[in-house]
Image: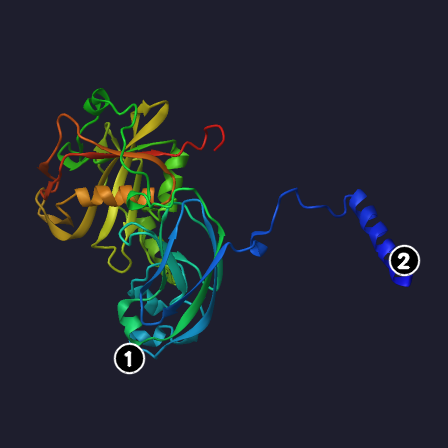
Amino acid sequence: MKNLAVSRLRGCAFLWLLSCGIIGLPPVGSQSTTNARSLHSYKVEVPATELWVDTKIDLRAGAKVRFTASGTMSYPAGQSPMDRFSTAGSFGPAGLSRGFADLLHQYPVRDAGHGALIARLGDATYAQPFAVGESKEYDVPVAGRLYLGLNQSQGEAANATGSFKVQIDLLAQGSASAAPATAGGPPDAPIAGITPQLLAEIPRRVTDPDGNPGDMVNVFLVGTQDEVLQAFTAANWVQVDKSAGSSALNAILDSLEKKDYLTMPMSTLMLFNRPQDYGLAHGEAVKVAMSRNHLRLWKSPYEVNGRPLWCISSTHDIGFERDQRNNGVTHKIDPDIDNEREYVSGTLAATGLVAQRDHVMPADALTTAKTATGGEFHSDGRIAVLVLKDTQAKGN
C-alpha cells in the first residue's frame, strides 16, 4: 500500500508539472537517433598499416549509419629534425592533436586528428573523406561503397602499429534502389532548357584582362547563388583569397592553428566582360603552390527553367612553366582539361545536391587551343551540365 501511494503521488506530480509547461512530452513519432534500433550491424577492423579498408558494405542514398570505434594505434618517435615537433605515441580513434610538422604531410581530412578514423563513400577520385573518430552518425547523400581509413600518410602507415575495431549500425535503409549511381550521382540525361540557341550565346573561352583568349568554359551549373556555394562547400572546395595580403595573413593563421593552407589566390580572368565572381580550389595539402584543382565561376545573364545559369572554367595546376606573354613564371595546367571537368562534376555530384547531370556538345566545340599564357590544352569539346537540387521548390 505504501508503494502504491508513492506511485500515485509521483504520478500526480508529473501531471502537475506537465500542465504547468515545466516539462513536456516528445512529439508523436519522434525518436532519439542515438538510441535508434539498428537494422543491421557490421564489424570491421582497420589495421594501422592500411590507408583504406573496403568494408564490402554498399549503402543506399538516404540511409543513416552509426559508427562506434575502439582500439589503440601507435606511431614511433620521428627520426628527422622536423619530426621532433610532430605527434607520436599511442592514441584512440579520435587521433592525435596536430603538430607543426603535420603541416608537411598530406592527410586525407585536413582538420581531423593525426591518425584519426575516417571514412569515405564511393570512388576515391571524387568521394570526399570525412572524420569519424570515436563515434559518428552519418546521413548517406548518394549510393555507394563504404570505405574506412586512417588520417595518415603512406610513409606513416608503414611504421604504425595497432588497429581500430569499428561497429557500423545501419539505422535507416534509404531509397529502394540499391544500385550506386555513376560517379556518386545521377547518370547523364537530357536537361530541358539547355538548347543549341543557349549554347551559341555563351563564349567558349575566357580571356585575360588584356583580351587574350584563355581557358575553356567547360562546366555549367544551374541554381541560385546560395545553392551553388552550398554545393561547393559540401564538396570541400574552398574560396581562394582575393589578394596577396590576405593570402599571407591566412597562411600564417592556418599554420598557427596547424591547418593546411589551401586558399592561395588565383589570377583574374574575364567572361561576360567582367572578372570571375568566385575563385574556388580543391587544393592538395603541402603541394598547393604548384598543384591544385581550381576553377573560376561566373553568373551568366541567362536562366534555365527560371533558375540562374553559372559558367565555370576549370583546370588542374600540375607545375610551373614560362609565361609566353612576359617571360615570367606561371602555373602549368594539365593539358587534358576534360579530366578537370569530370573532377568538378564528380565531386559536386557526390554531395547528393545534384538533381540532374548531362554532357552537351556545342556546334562550335573547342577541341584544342592555348591558354592566355601560351600553354596548350585539348578536349573532346563537351560541356558538363549540372542542375542543383531546387531548395526553394515546394517540399524541399
- Identify the mark at residue 63; answer none if there is no mark: none
- Name the secondary structure under disc 2: helix
In the rendered structure, the answer to whether residue 4 lies left or right of residue 71 reads right
| Residue 177 x %, y % | 39, 42
| Number of residues whose C-alpha sits closer than 10 Å to that of mark 1, classed few (under 14), some (14–19) or many (20 or more) | few
Q: Secondary structure at mark 1?
A: loop
Q: Could you tell which of marks 2 and 1 lies nearer the N-terminus?
A: 2
- Could you tell me if residue 243 is visible in this image? no
Relative to 83, is 216 above or below?
Answer: above
Counting from the top left corner in percent of width and height, residue 109 is at: 36, 58
The amino acid type of the residue labelled 1 equals Gln
Q: Which quadrant holds the N terminus?
A: bottom right
Which residue: 15% across, 33% down?
210
- The picture quadrant where one finds residue 216 is top left
Q: Nearer the viewer, residue 305 or 316?
A: 305
Colour option used? rainbow
**Label 2 Cα crowd, 10 Å radius (few <14 / some 14-19 / many 20+):** few
Q: Nearer the viewer, mark 2 or mark 1?
A: 2
Decide: is 94 above or below 237: below
In-image side of 2 versus 82 (left or right): right
Horizontal side of 176 relative to 187 (left or right) equals: right
Instruction: Give the residue pinned by disc 1.
Output: 79
Judge by depth and name the residue closer to the eye, 329 or 102.
Answer: 102
How far from the left and from the top, in percent, is residue 65?
A: 47, 54
Give, as a three-letter code, the residue at label 2: Ala
Real-space CA distance between mark 2 and mark 1, rounded to the nearest whole angstrom: 72 Å
Q: Is residue 356 visible?
A: yes
Residue 194 in picture, x, y percent from top left? 26, 25
Q: Residue at x 31, y 78 (%)?
A: 78
Q: How many marks?
A: 2
What residue did someone put label 2 on?
Answer: 5
